[in-house]
Image: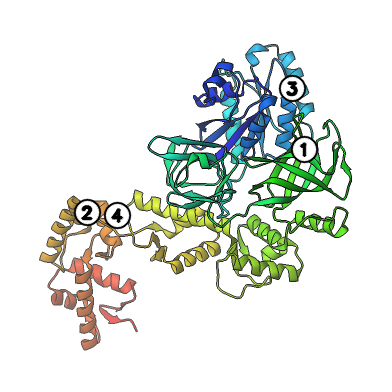
Amino acid sequence: MRVIGTAGHVDHGKSTLIAALTGTHPDRLKEEQAREMTIELGFGWLTLPNGEEVGIVDVPGHRDFIENMLSGIGGIDAALLVIAADEGVMPQTKEHLAILDLLQIPAGLIVLTKTDLASDSGWLDLVETDIRAAVKDTVMQDAPILRVSAKTKSGLDLLITNLQLLLQQKPARLDLGRPRLPIDRVFSMSGFGTVVTGTLSDGHLAIGDEVEILPSHQRGRVRGLQTHKKKEETAIPGSRTAVNISGVNTEQIQRGEVVAHPGQYQTTRRLDARFRLLKDASSSLKHSSEVKFFVGASETIANLRLLGTEEIKPGEEAWIQLELRDEVVAVRGDRYILRRPSPGETLGGGVIVDHQPKGRHKRFDENVLKSLASLAQGSPADVLLEAALALNAASIKEIATRSRLESENAESALKELIESGQLILLEEGEPKITSDILAAALPHWNALNGKILQIVESYHKSYPLRRGIPREELKSKLKLSPRVFNAILTQHAARNTLIDSRGVVSKSGHEIKFDSGQQAKVQGLMRKFEANPFGPPSVKESQAEVGEEVFDALIESGELITVSQDVVFRKQDYDLMVKKIRGAIQQKGQVTLAEVRDMLDTTRKYVQALLEYLDATSVTIRDGDYRKLRS
C-alpha cells in the first residue's frame, strides 16, 4: 500500500487532477467545492494497472493553508508536483518544492496540468525550461515532466504508467513492529463512534489491538480498520488508514496526536536536530528565535537554540536544540519543518538526531557538537541494524563487515540488538561478530514470516484437499537461497506454526476435510476395498468413483498407497500384506511371486506390482525368481 501526495500553487489543478485519476473529488467540504480551493486535506485512491492500490493526499496550495498542507505531506511515498501550463512556476510551487526537498520525499513526478489552455508547444517548452531550473538540486531534479489535461483526459494514461513504474522501483515500507499513526483527521460516525485517519508507519495495526493516543496518554482499542473505504483485519505500514477506536471520544483527540501501541513511544518537549535554512529565506535566523515546529501531523511553538553559532544565514546548516511548548511524538531520523510564526514563512528543516536529549546543551561545547555529529551517523546498534536491513538474511560476520564498526562496538551492538529482539537468529550457535550464523533484522523477519504464511494459507484455500504446498514450489515463490529457506522453515517448526514433512509444507493444524458428498463417495470406495482387500479397484476405477482430487487427497493423507501406475491398496491392507510377506521370508528364507500370490489368494497383477514396490522401497531384494529381505 503506497500513498502519494500532491504539491503546488493554488488553482493549478491538483484537486481536479485527482478527481480525473480516481473518479473521486478530494474536496470534502461544501465551501471548498464552492470556492474551488482546497482548505483541508483531501483524499482519493486509484488502482494501478498492476493491481496495486494507491492512496492520494490532496493538500492545500494557498499560502494561508500551508500548515494544513504540512500535516498531510510528511507520510507520503512519492509526490506529484503540479504546475499549471498557463502560469508556470509560482510562489507556492517554490515553497511546496522546498518542503518536499526538506522532507526528502523519496520520489516524484512533475505534472504539467491545464495543457488544454496552453496548446502552443513552444510555450510549453519554455515552461518546462523554467521548471527544470526551479527543481535543480532538489529531490525533484530528475523527475519526469508529464503534460496532462484533466479536462480532455490527455496524458492521464501516461501519468498512471509513470506512477506505477516509479513505485515499482521503491521498496515497500518496513514493518518495524512499532506502529505509529499521526492523526490528520478526527470525526465521529453514527453507529461506530470515534474515527481517526492518517498514514500508518513503522508497524501494523490489527482489530482488537489496545492503543495509546499520545501525547494525551488515552487508552482505547481498535474496533475497526479501513483502507480506501474497504474493511481490513490488519493495516500495514505505508497505508492510508481509518481507525475506529472504542473507549475514546472525538472531543478528547486532536489532529497531530499519534496512535501507537502502549509503551512503545515516549513523548518529548526537547529535540536535537540538524537544520538547513532555505537559501531564499528572507533573513538570517538567530539564537532563541520563536518558530513553529512541524513533525508528522503535529505542530507546536518552539524556542530555537543554536549550537556552535550565533546565527544561521540563508543556505547554511547548523546543529540546533528545540524546546517545545507542547509534547510531541518523534524518533531519531524523523524529518521536520520550521516556519516563522508571523509573517508566515517556511524557514527550513532537517532531521532529528536525538529525540530524548538528557538536558539543555551548552551552546559552544565541542564535545556536544562532536556527539551530535556521531549521533547523526547513528549509534553502533543503529549502524549494525541498518547493515542487517540492507543484507536481508545474512551471516552475522557479513552484517558486521558491512557495518564497518570496530570489533568492540560491533560486539556490543550485536548483543543489544539480539536482546531487544531487533535481530533474529535463524540458526543455533554462539552469536559473535565472527560467526557464520544466519541472522535477519526484525522487519525482514516479519516480512518473510508474513509472506510465507500468506503463501501457505493461500495454497490451502486454493487446494483444500491437498496436504500442503510442495516444498520446492514454496522456495521458488519466496526466491530464497536453500540455506535461508531451510533456516526459516526450521524456525517455524520450532514455533509449531508450519509443518515440513515429506516434501510438503503446511500450516500447523491443517486437516484435509471432505464435504458430505465427497465423504459419501469415499465410503462407497472403501467398501469396495474392504470386499476384496488384496485385489482392490484399480487407480483408474478409484478415480472414477471419487474424482481425481479426492483420490489424490486419500493418497496425500496416507489412507491409500499406490504401488504402481494402476495398483493401489488401503494402508491397513498394505501393512497386512507386508507383514505376511516378511513372515514367510523369515520362515523360509525366500519366497517366489507364485507363493505370495497363493498366500494372499489374489492375482499375479497385484502381487507383481506389490513386490516391485517393496524392492524399490528397500523392503525386499530380488534374487532371480526369489525375494529376500534386504539386510
Which image quadrant is residue 344 in? top right
**With 96 as the anchor, is 620 left or right in this view?**
left
Which label's residue is closer to the chain start, 3 or 4? Answer: 3
Which label's residue is closer to the chain start, 2 or 1? Answer: 1
Please give the residue where the numbered disc 3 appears in the rendered image.
89
Task: Tell me the CA gap for discs 4 and 1.
Answer: 61 Å
Callout 1: 10 Å neighbours few (<14), some, many (20+)?
many
Callout 2: 10 Å neighbours few (<14), some, many (20+)?
some
Q: As rendered, which of 28 and 110 lies closer to the eye?
A: 28
Task: Tell me the CA gap for discs 2 and 1.
Answer: 73 Å
Please give the residue where the numbered disc 2 appears in the rendered image.
543
Query: In the image, residue 365 lies at what x, y percent?
Result: 87, 57
Residue 600 appearing in the image: yes
Callout 4: 10 Å neighbours few (<14), some, many (20+)?
many
Nearer to us of marks 2 and 1 is 1
| Secondary structure category for the residue under label 1 | strand
Nearer to us of marks 4 and 2 is 4
What residue sits 63% from the left and 27% below the top?
60
In the image, residue 254 above or below residue 432? above
Task: Tell me the CA gap for discs 4 and 2.
Answer: 14 Å
Nearer to us of marks 3 and 4 is 3
Please give the residue where the numbered disc 4 appears in the rendered image.
465
- Kind of residue at disc 1: Gly
